[in-house]
Image (spheres, helix red, strand yellow):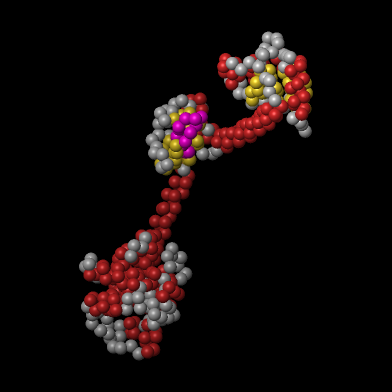
Amino acid sequence: MKKKILIVEDERIIAEDIRKCVLNCDYDVIGIVPTGQDTLLKIEEQKPDLILMDIMLEGKLDGIETAEKIISKHDIPVIYITANADDTILARAKKTNPYGYLVKPFEEIDLNAALEIAFYKYNADKELTRSEKRFRKLIQENTDVIIVIDKKRIIQFINNAGEMLFEKSKEQLINTKFEYKFDCEQFCEFEIEKKSEQKRIIEMHVVETEWEHKPVYLATLRDITFRKKIQDELKMSNIKLQKLMEETVNGLVSAMEMRDPYTAGHQKRVAELATKIAEEMGLDKDHVNGIRIASLIHDIGKIHVPSEILSKPGKLTEVEFAIVKSHSKAGYEILRTIEFPWPVAKTVLQHHEKLDGSSYPNGLTGDDIIIEAKILCVADVIEAMSTHRPYRPALSIEKALEEIIKNKSIKYDASAVDACVKIIREQNFCFA
């Protein structure tokens, strides 16, 4: 469909020349009218896509006054055509935001360019208007509160959610001071007292931007009361769960003490050193806690080992030693059904494994052994060599250090060994 052009020109000969040019540019001309009043009537009869408007017209209305009336009622682009281009007329014409301005006489090529630019600009303006409407609708209907605040902390805009949060109308809020403190690019929290309910906890984030060509703050507010409640409940649940796990572990340790006091004391001492090693290695608090728990019960499988073997003063037979070695797997079977938040059962299963695959129960090597078990292994060796055993007296702690240093990166994890040596030699660690 060709675009429809209305020509407003009170000089008939000029009007006909313009009509020919418009037709040659491949547009339709729906009429030629000489006055502003005729223009308004013609628009009502047959809405044009664009108006070519002479500024100097017969009758009460000139072209600029006619354009003002058109703009107030219709969405039609206007291009002014005139032989008079003085500054006063130009100033008046600018206020109507025309889509072009042609000075008579003009060439057909100039008219064609003016029409193409006008339609392009009109379509771009329409798309921009639609985008702005969509954006404003999104802002207004957003469930988060969105506030525009000027540099003097005065509210310039607030969306519908803001009315609900502050229990005031936009009229009451706009042009009032925003009372809550904030730092740009930082999240902050504050409380709001509401008439209709209890206090609400609000999270706010503020950025600097522009609003209507002025620098402003854009604040986004979100009610996080429910989220905070859930977080607090989860925190309490975690505390209760932690307490329950501690009680479970203490129960297992107590059971071990009743059967074999020596083994229970050994586990506590190993846990003390393993925890220090994990901290020195820079593991996070939760990771360290998991190693402490696993260390406290790493020999729980010895419940299945006859007490006469555990307390035997002499050298164990091959059969007896095989029974003792089974405690790693036995401990794993006891612990694997307990849902710890750490790999406790796996740590207990692997705590005698060495990097070179020379130990039990599965002869694992290198990275097949988890870091928790590697740390526990080093602590276990130090404690076992430096304390009394039924079958031999205690060796010095320096002898124990010599063992792990000599076999660093061969049997024992290098980082765990380095941390252990530093703790004992530089921090003067000793078993309680």
Residue 376 visible to the viewer: no
Residue at 35% across, 71% down: 375
Q: Return the residue nearer the eye: 65 or 304.
A: 65
Relative horizontal placement of residue 317, taking residue 154 as reference (left or right)? left
The mark tally for this picture is 0
Relative horizontal placement of residue 431, taking residue 87 as reference (left or right)? left
Q: Return the residue nearer the eye: 159 or 89.
A: 89
Q: Where is 408 relative to 115, above or below?
A: below
Q: Where is 321 relative to 283, above or below?
A: below
Point out the stretch of residues depicted in magenta.
209-221
Relative horizontal placement of residue 385, taking residue 13 as reference (left or right)? left
Residue 310 visible to the viewer: yes
Q: Where is 312 relative to 168, above or below?
A: below
Q: Where is 92 relative to 205, above or below?
A: above
Q: Is residue 3 magenta?
A: no
Residue at 44% across, 74% down: 368
Residue 285 position in % (x across, y down): 36, 60
Q: Return the residue nearer the eye: 206 or 386.
A: 206
The prevailing secondary structure element of the residues shown in magenta is: strand
Quadrant assignment, res 345:
bottom left
Residue 204 position in % (x across, y down): 44, 40
Residue 93 position in % (x across, y down): 61, 19
Instruction: Please identify the quadrant where the N terminus is shown.
Output: top right
